[in-house]
Amino acid sequence: MNSHRPAPPSLPTRPLPTLFLSHGSPLLAVQDSPAGRFLDGLADTLPRPSAIVVASAHFMSMQPLVGGDPRPRTVHDFNGFPEPLYAIDYPARGEPALAERITGLIAGAGLPARLRPAHGLDHGVWVPLRRMFPDADIPVIPLSVMPHADAATHLALGRALAPLREEGVLTIGSGGFIHNLGDLDFTRIDAPSPGWAREFGDWMRERLRARDWPALLDWQARAPHAQRAHPTVEHLMPLFVALGAAGLSPTPQPLHASQEYGSLALDAYAFT
Protein backbone atom coordinates (compact mmCIF):
# COMPACT_ATOMS: atom_id res chain seq x y z
CA MET A 1 0.00 0.00 0.00
CA ASN A 2 2.91 2.34 0.59
CA SER A 3 4.30 2.55 -2.95
CA HIS A 4 4.14 5.58 -5.22
CA ARG A 5 3.64 8.05 -2.41
CA PRO A 6 3.17 11.69 -3.34
CA ALA A 7 5.38 14.33 -1.79
CA PRO A 8 3.93 14.89 1.68
CA PRO A 9 2.52 18.28 2.62
CA SER A 10 4.38 20.39 5.14
CA LEU A 11 2.68 20.35 8.56
CA PRO A 12 3.80 21.83 11.87
CA THR A 13 5.07 19.41 14.49
CA ARG A 14 4.08 21.22 17.71
CA PRO A 15 1.37 21.43 18.75
CA LEU A 16 -0.13 18.70 16.61
CA PRO A 17 -2.55 19.75 13.88
CA THR A 18 -5.98 18.21 13.81
CA LEU A 19 -7.18 16.43 10.67
CA PHE A 20 -10.37 16.04 8.68
CA LEU A 21 -10.18 12.99 6.41
CA SER A 22 -12.73 11.75 3.89
CA HIS A 23 -12.73 7.99 4.23
CA GLY A 24 -14.74 7.29 1.05
CA SER A 25 -15.60 3.71 0.19
CA PRO A 26 -14.32 0.87 2.42
CA LEU A 27 -12.24 -0.12 -0.62
CA LEU A 28 -9.97 2.79 0.29
CA ALA A 29 -8.39 0.39 2.77
CA VAL A 30 -6.89 -1.73 -0.02
CA GLN A 31 -7.34 0.02 -3.35
CA ASP A 32 -4.65 1.98 -5.17
CA SER A 33 -6.09 5.47 -5.60
CA PRO A 34 -5.02 9.11 -5.24
CA ALA A 35 -6.73 9.29 -1.84
CA GLY A 36 -5.11 6.05 -0.71
CA ARG A 37 -1.65 7.16 -1.76
CA PHE A 38 -2.18 10.47 0.03
CA LEU A 39 -3.03 8.65 3.25
CA ASP A 40 -0.02 6.36 2.83
CA GLY A 41 2.27 9.37 3.09
CA LEU A 42 0.38 11.46 5.61
CA ALA A 43 1.85 9.97 8.79
CA ASP A 44 5.34 10.88 7.56
CA THR A 45 4.42 14.57 7.91
CA LEU A 46 3.52 14.25 11.60
CA PRO A 47 5.38 13.44 14.79
CA ARG A 48 4.37 10.06 16.11
CA PRO A 49 1.16 10.53 18.15
CA SER A 50 0.89 9.14 21.66
CA ALA A 51 -2.75 8.24 20.91
CA ILE A 52 -5.39 8.94 18.25
CA VAL A 53 -8.96 10.12 18.78
CA VAL A 54 -11.26 9.60 15.79
CA ALA A 55 -14.68 11.21 15.51
CA SER A 56 -16.31 8.93 12.96
CA ALA A 57 -19.39 9.45 10.83
CA HIS A 58 -20.27 5.81 11.48
CA PHE A 59 -20.39 6.14 15.27
CA MET A 60 -23.69 7.96 15.79
CA SER A 61 -25.46 8.71 19.04
CA MET A 62 -27.79 11.14 20.77
CA GLN A 63 -25.03 12.37 23.10
CA PRO A 64 -21.22 12.29 22.84
CA LEU A 65 -19.95 8.78 23.46
CA VAL A 66 -16.28 7.89 23.94
CA GLY A 67 -15.05 4.36 23.31
CA GLY A 68 -13.17 2.97 26.31
CA ASP A 69 -12.51 -0.62 25.25
CA PRO A 70 -8.89 -1.64 25.93
CA ARG A 71 -9.03 -4.07 22.98
CA PRO A 72 -11.58 -2.66 20.52
CA ARG A 73 -12.72 -5.07 17.87
CA THR A 74 -12.56 -4.27 14.15
CA VAL A 75 -16.12 -3.67 12.93
CA HIS A 76 -17.03 -4.43 9.30
CA ASP A 77 -20.07 -2.18 9.14
CA PHE A 78 -20.79 -2.44 5.39
CA ASN A 79 -22.32 -4.86 2.91
CA GLY A 80 -21.72 -5.97 -0.65
CA PHE A 81 -17.95 -5.51 -0.84
CA PRO A 82 -15.26 -8.05 -1.80
CA GLU A 83 -14.78 -10.80 0.77
CA PRO A 84 -11.14 -9.89 1.64
CA LEU A 85 -12.34 -6.63 3.22
CA TYR A 86 -14.24 -8.60 5.84
CA ALA A 87 -11.08 -10.43 6.87
CA ILE A 88 -9.16 -7.25 7.70
CA ASP A 89 -8.29 -6.80 11.35
CA TYR A 90 -6.93 -3.54 12.72
CA PRO A 91 -5.73 -4.63 16.17
CA ALA A 92 -4.98 -1.21 17.69
CA ARG A 93 -5.39 -1.16 21.44
CA GLY A 94 -7.54 1.31 23.31
CA GLU A 95 -6.59 3.49 26.25
CA PRO A 96 -9.40 3.49 28.82
CA ALA A 97 -7.78 6.07 31.12
CA LEU A 98 -7.45 8.59 28.30
CA ALA A 99 -10.98 7.80 27.13
CA GLU A 100 -12.25 8.56 30.61
CA ARG A 101 -10.33 11.84 30.65
CA ILE A 102 -11.75 12.81 27.24
CA THR A 103 -15.24 12.08 28.54
CA GLY A 104 -14.53 14.49 31.39
CA LEU A 105 -13.22 17.19 29.04
CA ILE A 106 -16.37 17.00 26.94
CA ALA A 107 -18.64 16.99 29.99
CA GLY A 108 -16.73 19.98 31.33
CA ALA A 109 -17.62 21.86 28.15
CA GLY A 110 -21.31 21.39 28.94
CA LEU A 111 -22.00 18.40 26.68
CA PRO A 112 -23.47 15.28 28.36
CA ALA A 113 -20.71 12.85 27.42
CA ARG A 114 -20.64 9.22 28.43
CA LEU A 115 -17.98 6.51 28.33
CA ARG A 116 -18.85 3.39 26.36
CA PRO A 117 -16.61 0.65 27.81
CA ALA A 118 -17.12 -1.81 24.93
CA HIS A 119 -17.09 -0.17 21.52
CA GLY A 120 -15.26 -1.27 18.38
CA LEU A 121 -13.56 0.54 15.53
CA ASP A 122 -15.91 1.10 12.58
CA HIS A 123 -14.62 1.51 9.04
CA GLY A 124 -14.58 5.29 9.38
CA VAL A 125 -11.82 4.69 11.94
CA TRP A 126 -9.81 1.75 10.69
CA VAL A 127 -9.91 2.41 6.93
CA PRO A 128 -7.88 5.65 7.04
CA LEU A 129 -5.75 4.49 9.98
CA ARG A 130 -4.79 1.30 8.18
CA ARG A 131 -3.30 3.44 5.39
CA MET A 132 -1.64 5.94 7.77
CA PHE A 133 -0.46 3.64 10.56
CA PRO A 134 -0.47 0.10 9.15
CA ASP A 135 1.27 -1.38 12.20
CA ALA A 136 -1.76 -0.52 14.39
CA ASP A 137 0.64 0.21 17.26
CA ILE A 138 -0.88 3.50 18.49
CA PRO A 139 -3.87 3.52 20.89
CA VAL A 140 -7.14 4.55 19.22
CA ILE A 141 -10.18 6.07 20.91
CA PRO A 142 -13.43 6.35 18.90
CA LEU A 143 -15.72 9.32 19.42
CA SER A 144 -19.32 9.62 18.24
CA VAL A 145 -21.05 12.32 16.23
CA MET A 146 -24.65 13.37 16.74
CA PRO A 147 -26.72 13.59 13.53
CA HIS A 148 -29.52 15.47 15.32
CA ALA A 149 -27.10 18.21 16.44
CA ASP A 150 -25.80 21.13 14.40
CA ALA A 151 -22.34 22.18 13.28
CA ALA A 152 -21.91 24.57 16.22
CA THR A 153 -22.44 21.71 18.68
CA HIS A 154 -19.77 19.66 16.94
CA LEU A 155 -17.44 22.65 16.92
CA ALA A 156 -17.91 22.86 20.70
CA LEU A 157 -17.29 19.13 20.99
CA GLY A 158 -14.01 19.57 19.14
CA ARG A 159 -12.96 22.56 21.25
CA ALA A 160 -13.29 20.43 24.35
CA LEU A 161 -10.53 18.24 22.88
CA ALA A 162 -8.15 21.11 22.05
CA PRO A 163 -5.83 20.53 25.07
CA LEU A 164 -4.94 17.12 23.65
CA ARG A 165 -2.88 18.70 20.86
CA GLU A 166 -0.21 19.79 23.33
CA GLU A 167 -0.03 16.25 24.72
CA GLY A 168 0.78 14.50 21.46
CA VAL A 169 -2.75 13.16 20.92
CA LEU A 170 -3.89 13.34 17.30
CA THR A 171 -7.56 14.24 16.77
CA ILE A 172 -9.09 13.15 13.46
CA GLY A 173 -12.55 13.79 12.08
CA SER A 174 -13.35 10.99 9.64
CA GLY A 175 -16.27 11.61 7.31
CA GLY A 176 -16.86 12.78 3.76
CA PHE A 177 -16.61 16.18 2.10
CA ILE A 178 -19.53 15.27 -0.17
CA HIS A 179 -21.51 12.14 0.66
CA ASN A 180 -24.67 11.19 -1.23
CA LEU A 181 -24.58 7.46 -1.97
CA GLY A 182 -27.79 7.65 -4.01
CA ASP A 183 -26.17 9.95 -6.58
CA LEU A 184 -22.95 8.00 -7.14
CA ASP A 185 -22.10 6.37 -10.47
CA PHE A 186 -20.89 3.01 -9.18
CA THR A 187 -20.13 1.85 -12.73
CA ARG A 188 -17.17 4.25 -13.07
CA ILE A 189 -14.74 5.21 -10.35
CA ASP A 190 -13.49 7.96 -12.68
CA ALA A 191 -16.93 9.33 -13.56
CA PRO A 192 -16.89 13.14 -13.91
CA SER A 193 -18.10 15.23 -11.00
CA PRO A 194 -21.58 16.69 -11.64
CA GLY A 195 -22.12 20.44 -11.51
CA TRP A 196 -24.02 20.46 -8.22
CA ALA A 197 -21.15 18.65 -6.48
CA ARG A 198 -18.56 21.03 -7.89
CA GLU A 199 -20.59 24.02 -6.72
CA PHE A 200 -21.00 22.69 -3.19
CA GLY A 201 -17.37 21.64 -2.95
CA ASP A 202 -16.10 24.97 -4.26
CA TRP A 203 -18.28 26.85 -1.78
CA MET A 204 -16.96 24.80 1.14
CA ARG A 205 -13.35 25.18 0.04
CA GLU A 206 -13.68 28.94 -0.36
CA ARG A 207 -15.36 29.35 3.01
CA LEU A 208 -12.60 27.33 4.66
CA ARG A 209 -9.91 29.31 2.84
CA ALA A 210 -11.52 32.56 4.01
CA ARG A 211 -11.98 31.23 7.57
CA ASP A 212 -15.62 32.24 7.26
CA TRP A 213 -16.83 30.35 10.31
CA PRO A 214 -20.35 31.89 10.46
CA ALA A 215 -21.08 30.76 6.90
CA LEU A 216 -19.64 27.29 7.51
CA LEU A 217 -21.65 26.81 10.68
CA ASP A 218 -24.75 27.76 8.68
CA TRP A 219 -23.78 25.55 5.73
CA GLN A 220 -27.17 23.86 5.41
CA ALA A 221 -28.85 27.21 4.70
CA ARG A 222 -26.05 28.93 2.77
CA ALA A 223 -24.15 26.34 0.74
CA PRO A 224 -25.45 25.58 -2.77
CA HIS A 225 -27.00 22.11 -3.08
CA ALA A 226 -26.37 21.42 0.62
CA GLN A 227 -29.24 18.93 0.92
CA ARG A 228 -28.08 17.02 -2.16
CA ALA A 229 -24.44 16.99 -1.07
CA HIS A 230 -25.40 15.69 2.38
CA PRO A 231 -28.90 14.19 2.55
CA THR A 232 -27.89 13.23 6.09
CA VAL A 233 -25.32 15.26 7.95
CA GLU A 234 -23.20 12.72 9.82
CA HIS A 235 -20.38 12.68 7.24
CA LEU A 236 -19.76 16.43 7.45
CA MET A 237 -19.94 16.77 11.24
CA PRO A 238 -16.43 15.30 11.78
CA LEU A 239 -15.05 18.32 9.90
CA PHE A 240 -16.41 20.62 12.61
CA VAL A 241 -15.01 18.40 15.36
CA ALA A 242 -11.56 18.63 13.76
CA LEU A 243 -11.96 22.37 13.25
CA GLY A 244 -12.88 22.93 16.90
CA ALA A 245 -10.14 20.64 18.22
CA ALA A 246 -7.54 22.98 16.68
CA GLY A 247 -8.48 25.73 19.15
CA LEU A 248 -10.18 29.10 19.06
CA SER A 249 -8.39 30.47 15.97
CA PRO A 250 -7.72 27.58 13.59
CA THR A 251 -6.00 27.91 10.23
CA PRO A 252 -7.21 25.41 7.60
CA GLN A 253 -4.66 23.83 5.31
CA PRO A 254 -5.96 21.79 2.36
CA LEU A 255 -4.04 18.54 2.09
CA HIS A 256 -5.80 16.57 -0.62
CA ALA A 257 -8.74 16.73 -3.02
CA SER A 258 -9.94 13.98 -5.31
CA GLN A 259 -13.28 12.47 -6.23
CA GLU A 260 -14.60 9.02 -7.09
CA TYR A 261 -17.78 7.64 -8.67
CA GLY A 262 -18.77 11.13 -9.78
CA SER A 263 -19.65 13.01 -6.62
CA LEU A 264 -17.83 11.23 -3.76
CA ALA A 265 -15.46 14.03 -2.73
CA LEU A 266 -12.40 12.93 -0.76
CA ASP A 267 -11.01 16.26 0.47
CA ALA A 268 -8.71 16.31 3.48
CA TYR A 269 -7.68 19.21 5.69
CA ALA A 270 -5.31 19.96 8.52
CA PHE A 271 -6.22 22.59 11.10
CA THR A 272 -3.43 24.33 12.98
Image (cartoon, grey):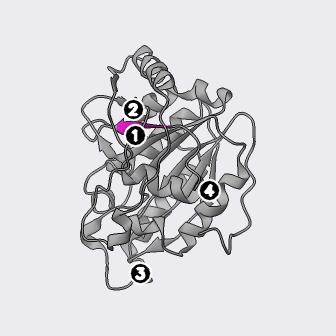
- Tell which of 189 and 204 is nearer to you: 189
> What amino acid is labelled 4 in the image?
Pro
Q: Quadrant of the N terminus?
A: bottom right
In the rendered structure, the answer to whether residue 200 lies left or right of residue 10 reads: left
- How far is mark 3 from mark 2, CA to CA? 36 Å
Q: Which residues fall within the magenta stretch?
A: 140-144
Point out the frontmost of discs 2 and 4: 2
- Compare marks 4 and 3 and give the one earlier in the sequence: 3
Mark 4 burial class by Cα count in 10 Å: few <14, some 14-19, many 20+: some
Question: Helix, strand or loop at disc 1?
Answer: loop
Give the SS element for disc 4.
strand
Reading the image, the residue beneath label 4 is 254
Residue hosting label 1 = 72
Above/below status of 34 relative to 73: below
The part of the image, by quadrant, that contains residue 89 is: bottom left
Residue 120 in the image: x percent, y percent? 35, 42
Judging depth in this view, the residue of 208 and 36 nearest the camera is 36
The mark found on residue 189 in the picture is 3
Q: Are marks 1 and 4 in contact (CB under 8 Å)?
A: no
**Circles 1 and 2 in contact, beta carbons < 8 Å:** yes
The label shown at residue 234 is none
Q: Secondary structure at mark 3?
A: loop
Sooner in the amino-acid sequence: mark 1 or mark 4: 1
**Nearer the observer, disc 4 or disc 3?**
3
Q: Is residue 182 visible?
A: yes
Q: Nearer the viewer, mark 1 or mark 4?
A: 1
Q: Is residue 210 above or below residue 102?
A: below
Amino acid at pointer 1: Pro
Counting residues from the start of the chain, the first of labels 3 and 2 encountered is: 2
Question: Gap in Å between the C-alphas at discs 1 and 4?
Answer: 31 Å
